Image (cartoon, rainbow, N blue to C red):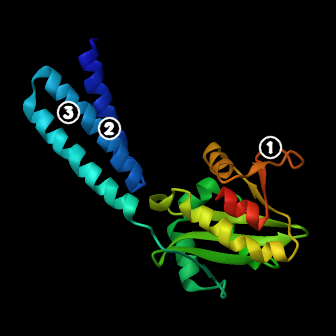
Amino acid sequence: MDLLSLLGYAASILVALSLMMGSIVKLRVLNLIGALAFAVYGGLVGAYPVLAVNAFIVVVNLFYLSRLSRFEPAFELLEIEQLKSRYLHRFLDHHAQDIAHFFPCFERARLDLEGIRAVYILRDMIPVGLVVCRPIDDEVIIELDYVIPSHRDLRCARYFYREFSPCYAARGLKRFAAHAANAAHRRYLLRLGFTPDLARGEGFYQRAITPSALKAGA
């Protein structure tokens, strides 16, 4: 197989992968790279319609990526006072399969635990995330930390941990504690600044509740 054929296959794979992305930014970046590879391929083999169409796609992706980079979403936390809220349970029902993948141990009964708190993460007033947590001794146990697939760019989670921490720090709590059931969740926690909790064993992670440090690392 010659280099031109490899370039064409690589471009095809990148375009196909871009369509599998839940994040619009990741979709456009991968699609941009794939279209650029196709444009080069079309120019090298003399397929000028392929070159023209993909050059246009590159320009379109650059335009929308530029717009996305200038747009700053508005985040807000909304604590759920009524844990029997119909909307809360509809949210859990709608995303049940995805939640079970990342949090197989989470059950609705966890909402009845003493001291439990449930918080929506709003992005432009749309509830895109849900965190369920409870303080025990000197730590906050993360029972659920879920963000819908289309908004998994870490910004929601970083906002939550930055903004929700001061109240717990003021009460003398020392750390967040979370358990990861799969590799994707482990990577997510590590990117948020969690570290392995060796005392608890494999799959357990912790992150210090220190407002100044959290803001610096967010």
Secondary element type, mark 1 = loop
Q: Position of residue 1 (x, y in %)?
A: 28, 11
Drawn side of residue 217 relative to residue 70, left or right: right
Q: Amino acid at mark 1?
A: Glu
Secondary element type, mark 2 = helix
* Residue position for label 2: 33
Query: From the viewer's perspective, is residue 68 above or below residue 46?
Result: below
- Residue at 63 percent across and 68 percent down: it is 160
Q: Nearer the viewer, mark 1 or mark 2?
A: 2
Drawn side of residue 52 relative to residue 32, left or right: left
Secondary element type, mark 3 = helix
Q: Position of residue 36 (x, y in %)?
A: 26, 36
Label 1–label 2 contact, CB within 8 A: no
Query: From the viewer's perspective, is residue 202 above or below residue 71?
Result: above
Drawn side of residue 32 relative to residue 80, left or right: left
Viewer-side residue, 113 vs 158: 158
For the question of whether residue 5 can be seen, the reply is yes
* Residue position for label 3: 39
- Residue at 39 percent across and 66 percent down: it is 71
Q: Callout 2 environment at 10 Å: few (<14), some (14 to 19), or many (20+)?
A: some
Looking at the rendered image, the quarter that the C terminus falls into is: bottom right
Viewer-side residue, 213 vs 40: 213
Q: Nearer the viewer, mark 1 or mark 3?
A: 3
- Residue at 67 percent across and 52 percent down: it is 189
Of the image marks 3 and 2, the number of the one nearer the N terminus = 2
Of the image marks 1 and 2, the number of the one nearer the N terminus = 2
Mark identifier at residue 202: 1
Mark identifier at residue 61: none
